[in-house]
Image (tube, helix red, strand yellow):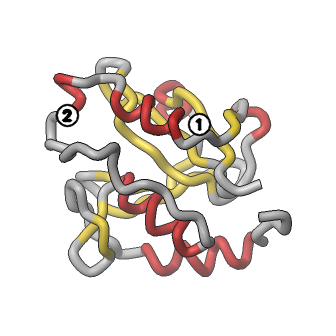
Amino acid sequence: MGNRIDEKRILELIEKYRGAKFLHNGRSLEEGIDCLGFVILFYRDLGVDLPNDDGKPIEEDWYKTNPNRYIRAIKNLGFKEVRFRDLRPLDMVYFAISHNIITHTGIMINKREFAHMSPNKNFLISKLERGWLSRARGAIRVIE
């Protein structure tokens, strides 16, 4: 995708997700979405199809038996890794929430904030600073 999506288009898309409810393995706005569901749907709106899973069911406690599963799937997408200082809107950021296991993703909506889903708070826009920055483990550029 050669032409960059402008901030206005990103904000229009974000509005579609405000009020979205969290649902583990959720993949529809009507029923609910999890962080992976949000990423899949958001990028699909921009013409990028990401896989829904890695070919196996995603149990609620998958990270206990296969802690590298999420990062392996992200790396297998084949997108360019991006340093935090080079982040721009639409880059996918990923996080280790507990036990240093990567289990969470979001999408940068500007240079300082990212959109994501929370099991406790549903759809959120958070600043990539302090707590989130300390949990951040990397980023990829899905849309050039």
Left or right position of 100 against 62: right
* Image quarter hosting the C terminus: bottom right
Quadrant location of residue 68?
Answer: top left
Q: Residue at x 30, y 64 (%)?
A: 33
- The residue wearing badge 2 is 62
- Determine the CA span between mark 2 and mark 1: 28 Å
The image shows residue 110 at horizontal and vertical percentages of 70, 56
The image shows residue 52 at horizontal and vertical percentages of 36, 56
Position above or below: 100 against 94: above
Secondary structure of the residue carrying tag 1 is loop
Kind of residue at badge 1: Glu
Left or right position of 69 against 84: left
| Nearest-to-viewer mark from 2 and 1 | 2
Position above or below: 142 against 99: below
Kind of residue at badge 2: Trp
Proximity of marks 2 and 1: CB atoms separated by less than 8 Å: no
Is 38 or 53 nearer to us in this picture?
53
Is 76 or 44 nearer to us in this picture?
76
Quadrant location of residue 37?
Answer: bottom left
Residue located farthest toward the front when viewing the structure as drawn = 55
The image shows residue 105 at horizontal and vertical percentages of 45, 45
